[in-house]
Image (tube, rainbow, N blue to C red):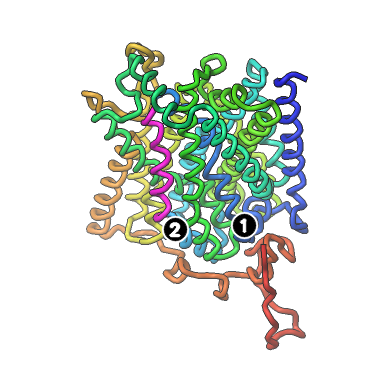
Amino acid sequence: MSDRDVEIAVFVLLMTVMMGLGLAAARWRQPQSIHSLEEWGVGGRAFGSWVTWFLLGGSMYTAYTFVAVPALTYGVGALGFFAVPFAIATTPVAFILSARAWSVSHRHGFVTPGEMAGARFGSPGLAALVAVTGIVATMPYVSVQLLSLQAVFKTLGVDGEWPLLVAVGLVSVSTFRSGLRAPALLSIAKDILLVWVVVSGVLIVAMSGGWGTTFRRAAEHFAKTPSPADGLLLSGPGQIGYLTMVVGSALSIFAYPHAVIAIIAARDRSTVQRNTAALPVYCLALGLMGLLGLFAVANGVVPVGRDLNTITPQLFHKLLPGWSAGIAYATLGVAALIPAAVMSIAAANAFTRSIYRQYLRPDAGPAEEARVSRWASLVVKFGAVGVILLLDPAYSAELQLIGGAVILQTIPAVMFGLTTAWFHRAALIAGLVTGLVTAVAMLYRIPQLGPGGVVVKAHFGGSSWSFGDGVMVYVGLIALLANLIVSVAGTVLLRFAKVPAGIDRTRPEDYTADVGDPMVKRLDDLLDGLPRTPGGAHTRPFAPPPHQRGVTTPRRRTRF
C-alpha cells in the first residue's frame, strides 16, 4: 500500500469507530429515554467533572483551533495569533458568569441563553430576539467546522462538492439520534487523539531544524510578499486591529449558545468552576497549532487548490508517515464534528424553547420538544452550508469573527443580565437591534482584497473596519458600543418616564444555588450522567417514597 492508501485506511477506520461511538452514545449511561429536551439537548444536566472537561474543551477548542488558526498564521503571520490571548483572557469572565448561569438554569429548567434573558427582564420578545441572534451567529461558526472537515477530504483527494456534503452528513448522523451525549463521548476520544497530534507536531519541528530555523525562513518569506499587513511582527496600525479582535473575541466566545449548553449540562457549580479555571491548559495546543502555520511557511507546504484550510492536513501528509498522518486527519475530523454537533444542538434548543414553544406550541410536551430540536438542528447545519456559499471568505477564521460580531450584541441582555436587572427590556431590544443593524451594515461594506489591493469581492470580505492609514478595528466592538449606548440611554429615559419594566421572574438566590439547594431538583439522584429516572433534573419535583419520609439516608457518592 502507498502512503496515501495507508492514510485513507487509517482515517476511514478511526472515523468509522467515532461514528459508531456517536450512535452508541444514545445508550451511554443507559438513559431510560432520550426523547426529551432534558436528555437529548442537555444530557440530563448531570455530566461529571471529567465529561464536562472534555465537552467544554471539545466545543470551545474546535477545528477553528486546528485548521483555521494555522491557515491564518500561514497567510498573514503574527496577526493570526490573536486567538491565543483571547482564549486566555476570557477565562476570568467565564469563571464568574458560568457558575451563575448554571445556578439559574438548574433552578428554572432553562436550556438556552434566551430563556435566561427573557425571565430576567420579563420579556418573551427579548428571549426570542436573543434566540434568533444566537442561531444566526452560530451558523458561521458551524461553517468553520464544515470547511475544516472538507479540507481533510480534499487533502485525501476527494474533490468537488462531495467533501462538504459528506461533512454535513457526518455531523447530522452523529447528533440526530444521540443529542449532546454524542459530542460528550466523542470529546473524550478526540482528546486522546489530540495528544498524539501535539506530540507529532513537536517532533516534526524538532527533526526539521527547530523553531529558530522556522522563524528565520518565515521572516524571509513574509519580507518578499507585497502585503504590508503580514509578517512575524505586527505593524503599528495592525496592533490596534489585533487588540480589538482579542477583546471582541474574548467577550463573544462564552456568549454563544453552545458554550452555555456545555456549562448547564454539568451536575454542580464546582464542576463548572473547576473546568472553566482549567481551560487555559488547551491554549498550549492552540499556540502550537498557530506556530505550525509558520512552520508550514518555512517548509514550503502548498495548500490544495489554493484552499488555505488544507495547510494543516497537507503539513501532516508531507512530514508524517502514512499511518500517523491518518491519525492526525481523524483528529481534525473529530475536532470538527464535536463543536458542529454541540453548536447545532444549542441553536436548535434556542429555536424550540424561545420561539416554537413560546409562540407556536405553548403546550408542547418533552417528546415534541426533542423532535422539533432534532429537525431544527439539521436546518442549522444546512444553513451553515448556505453561509459558506454566500460569504466564501479568504480565511475561514473570518467566519468565526463575523459570527462573533453578531453574538456580541446579546451581551447586555444575557451576560449583564446574569449580574443585574437594571436594564429596561425595551431599551435592551432597541440596543440589540441597533447593534445587529450596525454590525451587518458594516460587514456588508467591507471588501475582500487580493494581492496588490485588488478587490476580489465587494461585500462581506472581512470583519475589521478600516479607518485609514492601515488602522483596522473589529466591527463587533463598534456595534457593541452602539448597542450599549442605546441600551443605557434608553433605560435611563424609560425609567425617567416611568414606563413599566418587565417583571423579573428570578431572585438573587437563584444565581448562587447549588446542589444542596432544595429548589435544585433531583441532582442527588443523578449518577454521573445517569438519570435513575427519565426526564432530566427538572421534569418533576423529587419526593422520597412514603416509607422513607422523615428518614435520613446516606448520600450516594458519585465518581467519574
Q: CA distance from mark 1 to mark 2?
A: 17 Å
Task: From the image, tell me which residue sits under label 2.
Answer: 95
Residue 348: quarter of image: top right
Toward the viewer: 412 or 203? 203
Q: Residue furthest bottom?
A: 550
Q: Position of residue 247 (x, y in %)?
A: 34, 43
Residue 84: quarter of image: top left
Question: What residue sits 52% from the left and 65% below the top?
Answer: 269
Mark 1: secondary structure: helix
Say whether disc 1 or disc 2 marks the residue closer to the N-terminus. Answer: 1
Mark 2: secondary structure: helix
Residue 82 painted magenta: yes
Q: Quadrant of the C terminus?
A: bottom right
Q: Is residue 49 above or below residue 380?
A: below
Identify the disc placed on residue 50. 1
Q: Position of residue 393 (x, y in %)?
A: 46, 23
